Image (cartoon, rainbow, N blue to C red):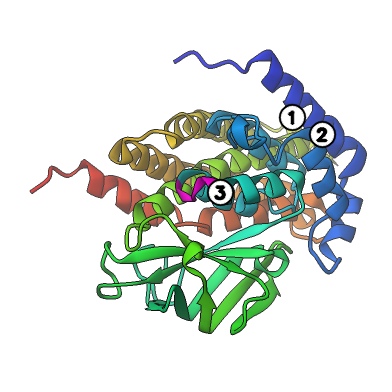
């Protein structure tokens, strides 16, 4: 398959690269990690001015009508610069869900606010006992009057501490692990009975657990038909995985660049260690893994917008499984080739490695998606 970026996409890529070099170097990033938000509010404002926050939304709500391939380009640069802003959670996941399933009135109200950077939304779809299973929903939704009462808990809500709204999956009918009966609700942060417990993740980003104690929301808080939200949430997660795959590719290429530079400058026995044959072979393996990962990320992005759920999920699972394995190889080799410098917090290599590890674990690790992919290959009984 021939794949080339358009002139507009290349211009956007160049703009992001210049932004990272000018405004998001490693020292500035370390200061951002220590801030209360865990990301840069100023950078978020610049993303809005550049149109990044409006990129995947329809033009009739002020968006740019971009595709998953456009998002792939952005996320690859997010990976190379280790950017910390909640683009994945608020724009790709939550914005994508609202675009796909919300009423036109809600889209026209909330999507422009997301595009302008004035509202951030986080997706709360996982629970402690469910691991990566989106259908495991014990959080209960009960109709009361003209509204809904929500009770339960949600875990590892990405960028939850800074969110203004939450998209919460809750069970309106059926048993805990039934595919049917899962509904989706928009819950404002200041809803009575909602408790947000924030904490830092391993890479310095922020996540939260939610406790919903008889939280009341209006009838208009229901997103889409009652009991039929699982398919649209799975589609949003698939898009999120495709975006994560692109981010991992950006991390791997940046990590390879840093490692190659180190091999050229670090000397032993009077010569650069990059001249040693064994290290050349290891560096070649890293470069091959990164290039193959790019191909898998392209396949994931091209299929992320597909209406064929089986085809989409098969491509996404294959990409996530392969890139998880490749990221582990690249990260471990980079740390070993850097020696002790590869694990210190003062060197960017350790941050790249941690980010690759977290990407692998987010929305299902390599083993989980390898199992999904193999199950899809079995003939239907």
Q: How many angstroms separate mark 3 from mark 1 (CA)?
A: 63 Å
Q: Which of 328 and 275 lies nearest the eye of the viewer?
A: 328
Q: Quadrant of the N terminus?
A: top left
x, y percentage for residue 372? 31, 51
Residue 272 numbered tag: 2
Relative placement, left or right, of 192 versus 205 is left
Which residues, given as a range, are shown in magenta? 101-105
What residue lies at 64% left-to-right and 50% top-to-bottom?
109
CB atoms of marks 1 and 2 within 8 Å: yes
CB atoms of marks 2 and 3 within 8 Å: no
Secondary structure beneath dot 3 equals: helix
Mark 2 or 3, closer to the camera: 3
Residue 275 numbered tag: 1
The residue carrying mark 3 is: 105
x, y percentage for residue 211? 55, 82
x, y percentage for residue 316? 41, 41
Q: How many angstroms separate mark 2 from mark 3 (CA)?
A: 63 Å
- Residue 314 in sight in this render: yes
Relative placement, left or right, of 40 versus 218 is right
Question: Which quadrant of the structure image shows residue 64?
Answer: top right
């Amino acid at each position: 398959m021939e794949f080339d970026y358009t002139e507009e996409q290349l211009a956007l890529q160049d703009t992001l690269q210049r932004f990272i070099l000018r405004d998001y170097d490693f020292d500035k990033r370390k200061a951002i990690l220590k801030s209360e938000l865990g990301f840069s509010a100023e950078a978020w404002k610049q993303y809005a001015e550049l149109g990044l926050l409006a990129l995947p939304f329809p033009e009739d709500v002020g968006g740019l009508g971009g595709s998953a391939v456009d998002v792939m380009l952005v996320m690859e640069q997010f990976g190379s610069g280790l950017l910390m802003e909640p683009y994945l959670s608020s724009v790709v996941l939550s914005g994508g869900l609202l675009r796909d399933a919300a009423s036109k009135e809600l889209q026209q109200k909330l999507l422009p606010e997301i595009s302008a950077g004035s509202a951030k939304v986080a997706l709360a779809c996982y629970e402690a006992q469910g691991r990566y299973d989106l259908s495991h929903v014990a959080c209960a939704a009960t109709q009361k009057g003209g509204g809904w009462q929500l009770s339960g808990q949600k875990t590892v809500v990405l960028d939850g501490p800074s969110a203004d709204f939450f998209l919460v999956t809750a069970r309106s009918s059926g048993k805990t692990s039934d595919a049917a009966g899962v509904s989706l609700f928009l819950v404002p942060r200041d809803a009575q009975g909602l408790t947000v417990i924030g904490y830092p993740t391993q890479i310095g980003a922020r996540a939260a657990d939610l406790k919903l104690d008889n939280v009341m929301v209006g009838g208009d808080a229901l997103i889409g038909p009652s009991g039929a939200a699982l398919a649209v949430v799975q589609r949003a997660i698939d898009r999120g995985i495709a975006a994560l795959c692109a981010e991992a590719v950006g991390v791997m290429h940046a990590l390879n660049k840093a490692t190659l530079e180190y091999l050229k400058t670090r000397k032993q026995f009077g010569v650069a260690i990059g001249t040693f044959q064994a290290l050349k072979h290891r560096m070649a393996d890293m470069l091959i893994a990164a290039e193959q990962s790019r191909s898998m990320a392209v396949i994931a992005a091209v299929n992320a917008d597909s209406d064929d759920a089986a085809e989409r999920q098969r491509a996404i699972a294959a990409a996530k499984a392969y890139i998880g394995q490749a990221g582990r190889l690249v990260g471990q080799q980079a740390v070993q080739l850097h020696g002790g410098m590869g694990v210190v917090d003062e060197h960017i290599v350790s941050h790249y490695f941690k980010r690759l590890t977290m990407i692998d674990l987010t929305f299902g690790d390599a083993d989980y998606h390898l199992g999904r992919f193999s199950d899809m290959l079995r003939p239907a009984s």
